[in-house]
């Protein structure tokens, strides 16, 4: 496993197979070293903006046992649509997106990360943006060469083949920031670019935060699926880890 505290050059130099050359000899043939595969994977994750903690989120390890009754029915429907979308978007670059709604700790972000990981695995291009972080970046763009920095952030979010906006919540939206969110959504709608959104807000709540124009774009961009759970899944996972530590 790669040491993420080191640069790629340092990781390659540490490689016992190629010693930093990036190739190994198999008979008379020079082939790419395994470390280069890891480097390509690391680069894909960095370009996608997927946090390290979410890189292991896969459809194969989605935990249905955290849901019961009607919660399980909703989870199965959202899961199936998310998995279908991850495959469909690689064939149809104008596929209709998804909006995953529900309370905190119901599995929305996990499913969104599953989509991102599946697209990366298929060598597709995706950008995973956590909305509070995006807002911080936009506000920080006021420092230094603000116009250049803001344009870079906006261009990337607008034009990437698949955009995932995670945690579209009740943040401190100034009129300026709300306008930027609307601009991203409107551009992607006009260009028919697939978009995935996770939020713990209802559409009326989003309208209060971002305005009716943004909501109208979301409705046109995304099919809506709601996730619910009897308890916050993150708390259940934390309890599992604690029990696992006690039994070790």
Image: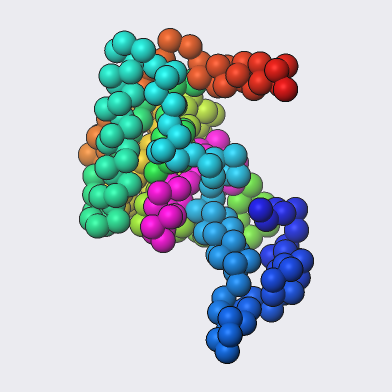
Apparent side of residue 208 relative to residue 12 in the rendered image (left or right): left
Res 9 quadrant in image: bottom right
Vertical placement of residue 168 versus 236, above or below: below
Q: Position of residue 173 (x, y in %)?
A: 50, 32
User: Which residue is at the front of the view, 206 or 80?
Assistant: 80
Q: Position of residue 59 (x, y in %)?
A: 40, 38
Viewer can see residue 209: no
Apparent side of residue 49 relative to residue 126 in the rendered image (left or right): right
The residue positioned 45% from the left and 48% from the top of the image is 117
Res 65 quadrant in image: top left
In the rendered view of the protein, which quadrant contains the C terminus? top right
The residue positioned 59% from the left and 39% from the top of the image is 53
User: Which residue is at the front of the view, 26 or 176?
Assistant: 26
Q: Is residue 117 magenta?
A: yes
Q: Which is the main secondary structure of the residues drawn in magenta?
A: helix
The residue positioned 63% from the left and 47% from the top of the image is 140
Vertical placement of residue 197 versus 29, above or below: above
Vertical placement of residue 57 versus 145, above or below: above
User: Which residue is at the front of the view, 75 or 248?
Assistant: 248
Q: Is residue 1 magenta?
A: no
User: Which residue is at the front of the view, 169 or 98?
Assistant: 98
Vertical placement of residue 115 versus 31, above or below: above
Query: Which residues make up the magenta segment?
Result: 116-138
């Amino acid at each position: 496993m790669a040491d993420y505290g080191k640069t790629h050059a340092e990781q390659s130099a540490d490689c016992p197979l190629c010693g930093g050359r990036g190739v190994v000899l198999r008979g008379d043939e020079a082939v790419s070293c395994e470390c280069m595969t890891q480097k390509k994977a690391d680069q894909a994750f960095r370009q996608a903006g997927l946090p390290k903690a979410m890189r292991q989120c896969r459809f194969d390890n989605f935990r249905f046992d955290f849901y019961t009754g009607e919660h399980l029915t909703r989870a199965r429907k959202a899961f199936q649509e998310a998995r279908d979308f991850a495959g469909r978007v690689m064939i149809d670059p104008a596929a209709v997106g998804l909006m995953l709604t529900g309370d905190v700790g119901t599995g929305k972000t996990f499913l969104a990360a599953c989509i991102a990981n599946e697209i990366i695995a298929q060598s597709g291009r995706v950008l995973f943006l956590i909305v509070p972080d995006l807002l911080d970046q936009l506000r920080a763009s006021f420092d230094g060469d603000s116009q250049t920095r803001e344009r870079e952030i906006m261009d990337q979010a607008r034009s990437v083949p698949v955009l995932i906006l995670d945690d579209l919540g009740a943040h401190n939206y100034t009129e300026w920031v709300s306008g930027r969110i609307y601009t991203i959504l409107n551009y992607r709608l006009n260009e028919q670019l697939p978009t995935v959104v996770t939020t713990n807000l209802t559409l009326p709540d989003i309208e209060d935060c971002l305005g009716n124009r943004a909501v109208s774009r979301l409705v046109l961009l995304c099919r809506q699926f709601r996730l619910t759970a009897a308890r916050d899944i993150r708390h259940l996972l934390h309890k599992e880890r604690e029990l696992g530590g006690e039994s070790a």
